[in-house]
Image (spheres, grey):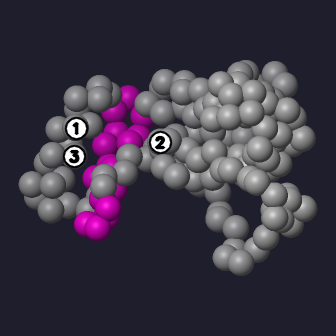
Amino acid sequence: MVDNDIRNYARIMQEMDLTGLEIREDNVTIRLERNLTSPLTVTQVSAPSAAAAPAGVVSPAEEEMNGTDLYTVTSPMVGVFYAAPAENADSFVDRGARVRAGDTLGIIEAMKLMNEITAEEDGVVAEICVKNGQVVEYGTPLFRLKR
């Protein structure tokens, strides 16, 4: 499926005021969903999504780092998060790892393209917020790093 095709489907969804559309081609299923108050979201429905943490729950890393200078690396897109470059390879980073600006933290696969997620600045990985193979949305917290 070509990016241009998805744009055409999105345009049709807007013209017909549709909130959802599912397209199946070959072995790929793409579901487009639109919330009338937010922009169009594209998700692959072939992978299960992970449940969100209950509101008000503080992770051990947040508790431990309470009052320190943390920043969160969020997902820039919808896709599948991978912690390692290959199935049996070591993770790019582990909790407690020292990273430099530009170091690869993980990969997000979107539309069969692998997109590297990099550290924005030097720091230490305080928390890895997602699991390998987890479907992530735009803005999903991926990592918390201590400056």
Q: Say left or right for 117 vs 44.
A: right
Question: Which residue is at 81% across, 64% downward?
Answer: 67
**How many C-alpha atoms fall within 10 Å of the one at disc 1: few (<14), some, or many (≥20)?**
few
Question: Which residue is at 68% across, 28% downward?
Answer: 101
Q: Quadrant of the C terminus?
A: top right
Say which quarter of the image contains residue 30: top left
In this orientation, which residue lies closer to the viewer: 67 or 131?
67
Instruction: Please name the residue that numbered disc 3 is placed on.
Output: 10
Quick check: marks 1 and 2 in contact, CB under 8 Å? no
Question: Residue flagged by tag 1: what amino acid is it?
Answer: Arg
Give the number of the disc on residue 77.
2
Quick check: marks 1 and 3 in contact, CB under 8 Å? yes
Q: Is residue 140 above or below residue 100?
A: below
Instruction: Please name the residue that numbered disc 1 is placed on.
Output: 7
Stretch of the chain drawn in magenta: 21-38
Sequence-first tag of 1 and 2: 1
